[in-house]
Amino acid sequence: MPPLILCTGVALDLASPPTYSAAPMLAAAPLIAAPFFSTLITLITGVAAVLASVGLLFYNRTADQIPALTGTLTVLTVSALAVLINRVVRRSGERLASARVIAETAQKAVLPAPAERIGGLQIAARYEAAQADAFIGGDLFAVQDTPFGVRLVVGDVRGKGLDAVEAVAVVIGAFREAAEHEATLEGVAERLERALAREGTRRTGLDAFEGFTTAVLAEIPGGDRVVRVVNRGHPEPLLLHVDGGVEPLLPSEAALPLGMGELAVWPDRVDVTPYPPGATLLFYTDGLSEARDAAGAFYDPKERLAGRIFPGPEELLDALVADVRRHTGGDTTDDMALLAVSRPAAGQPERRRTMPVVPGDDG
């Protein structure tokens, strides 16, 4: 574009009366180069614009006319400013790139991607940020192979920014510790509740009273073909069968999100659902179910996935993300965390872990 503008400006000046000045077009060339090209190219474009303006002064024999001299001085000034703008833009770009690296590193530390196979299950996870170039927010997921089977958590922390990231770190840290040592899924949920309660006393302001996390915890034992779920105010997971059927895992009893134990306390209820070979569990945050199209209609994952069959969890998430983008036109307003867990089809070996003896258990 800059060379084209320079050539066009010179051609128009040559084809026009001497009173016409191409200075505006010549000055535009380095300004356009500044944000898109290197400092060297911007400098070369500015020098070329100044030389073209000076050359046209002598060609048109207007070097002794104030308007023509003013136009050349304008080209020189704008070229110098273009080089300065280029340096500012490049420094800002370097800072942004550094911030992206830091954010990506923080995400890998706080929210590491799970392995593709855990406990004999196929795993796929995605974090889709609503804001471009954002890497981490309040959505979370974690999968862990434990002596009690594969355990996982998917959740959504209320709020945004660093406070939400801190709460994500608290929940995932507490989950990894509890999942390894608590004998029951209810015990894991209780440990997360206590961890968030301690975090709430440390915070100040609104979060000290209204901070909470919606979460769904699941346990897939190595020996039984079932999935155990505790839902704490989170969108219900979906069980995708090999024939294309979609079954929502609705909680038998509604429960408050984690971190709201001061409002009401009752025992967590575990719901047990058959989890046959070849089936896939889909966990997600409300960034998926609350994604809207241009008419304001919500995205319904159960309806959109019904009747569809996917080779594996990665393909499922690929298709799901693409479908959400089509539904919203690429304009999402909330982050979206997705976790897909597939049990190998019949005939494929599954790794089983021996259940440990729980202290105090007579069995």
Image: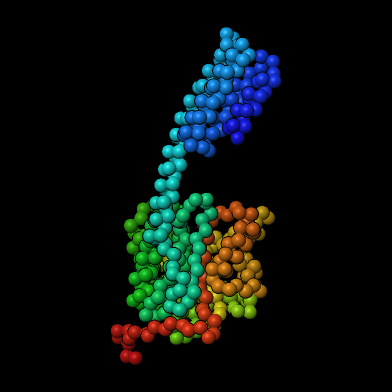
Task: Name the residue: 61% across, 11% down.
Answer: 61
- Front one among 262 and 188: 188
311 lies above or below 209: below
The extreme top residue here reads 64
Residue at the far bottom in the pictured view: 363
Report the number of numbered marks. Answer: 0
Left or right of residue 286: residue 306: right
Q: Looking at the picture, does residue 206 appear above or below residue 89?
A: below
| Residue 88 lies in quadrant | top left
Q: Is residue 308 left or right of residue 166?
A: right
Q: Residue at x 51, y 56 (%)?
A: 129
Instruction: Using the rendered view, name the quadrant where residue 7 is placed.
Output: top right
State the residue at coordinates (33%, 76%): 181
State the residue in front, 292 or 317: 317
Q: Which of the 4 image quadrants contains residue 107?
A: bottom left
Residue 55 in percent (x, y) is at 57, 18
Q: Is residue 219 above or below residue 5?
A: below
Residue 267 in view in this figure = no
In the image, 287 versus 315, the foreground residue is 315
Determine if residue 285 is in view: yes
The x, y position of residue 105, in whole percent, is 39, 55
Q: Whole-percent x and y of residue 146?
A: 38, 77
**Figure coloring:** rainbow
In which quadrant will I find the C terminus? bottom left
Which part of the image, by quadrant, shows the N terminus?
Answer: top right
Q: Residue at x 57, y 68 (%)?
A: 315
Which of 59/191 is in front? 59
194 sits left or right of 212 in the view: left
Decide: is 149 above or below 26.
below
Q: Position of residue 157 (x, y in %)?
A: 45, 60
